[in-house]
Image: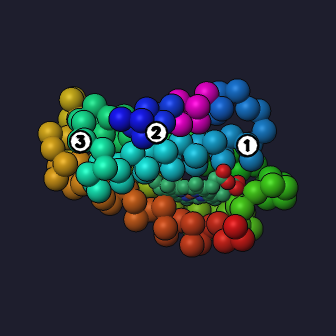
Amino acid sequence: MKKFALAVSALCLSVSAVAAADDPIAVRKAIMQANAASAGLAGAMMKRELEYNPAIAKAAILTLSASAKSFGDFFPEGSGDGDTTAAPAIWGDAAGFQAALDKYMTDTAAAVEASGKDGPADLAAFQAAIGPVFGNCKSCHENFRVQNN
Ligand code: HEC
């Protein structure tokens, strides 16, 4: 239960950090932290460390979907320098980055669609809905993130 409360507050903190910041690097990192919190919640339910809860499952999916829609707005020219792990390919291969964003948006929108009004009915339905979303984390990081940490 403690873990659950921590995960939910991590989600809320990340989202308020997004609202407060005006630095694009800080905003995009905060969006990614919200992703990590959602992925953590989802993983805990899949590993049965956390009892499955359809409303929490849906909140995690909605957070990922919101992140997919906004993330691409925080990469202005020149924001590749500084305290960031964004790879130069984001600007050098803008079409490729856009394609990765588009795929992420498509996959998260499908997960929202599959989760219905009250969230996925059970763990199997949740896994089926969110599974394809997680492939995006790895593929985008491999191509568009510098692995220096
Ligand atoms: C479309 C590309 C893309 C997708 C999809 C994506 N990421 Fe990222 N992620 C990035 C980039 C780019 C950065 C580096 C941001 C920076 O440092 O400016 C990053 C950074 C991060 C960070 C580090 C944030 C920090 O504070 O430095 C975490 C954690 C993270 N991503 C988790 C995830 C998870 C979990 C998913 C899947 C649910 C995901 N990401 C999906 C591109 C992506």
Residue 57 sits in quarter:
top left
For marks 2 and 1, the one nearer the N-term is 2
Quadrant, the N terminus: top left
Looking at the image, residue 89 lies above or below residue 52: below
Mark 3 surroundings within 10 Å by alpha-carbon count, few (fewer than 14), some (14 through 19), many (20 or more): many
Label placed on residue 105: none
Residue found at x 49% / y 69%? 139
For marks 3 and 1, the one nearer the N-term is 1
Looking at the image, residue 142 lies above or below residue 113: below
The region drawn magenta spans: 10-16
Mark 3–mark 1 CB contact (< 8 Å): no
Q: Amino acid at mark 3?
A: Tyr
Mark 2 surroundings within 10 Å by alpha-carbon count, few (fewer than 14), some (14 through 19), many (20 or more): some
Is 52 on the left or on the right of 80, as rendered? left
Secondary structure beneath dot 2 equals helix
Of 7 and 61, nearer the camera is: 7
- Pick out the residue farthest to the front: 2
Secondary structure beneath dot 1 equals helix
Residue found at x 70% / y 27%? 20
Quadrant, the C terminus: bottom right
Q: Which residue was labeled with disc 1?
A: 26
Q: Which residue was labeled with disc 3?
A: 52
Q: Gap in Å between the C-alphas at discs 3 and 1?
A: 32 Å
Across and down, in percent, residue 21 comes to 73, 32
Residue 6: tell me if it is visible.
yes
Q: Gap in Å between the C-alphas at discs 2 and 3?
A: 14 Å
Q: Which residue was labeled with disc 2?
A: 7
**Does ligand 1 reach within 8 Å of label 3's beta carbon?**
no
- Of the four image quadrants, the one with ligand 1 is bottom right
Secondary structure beneath dot 3 equals loop
Q: Amino acid at mark 1?
A: Ala
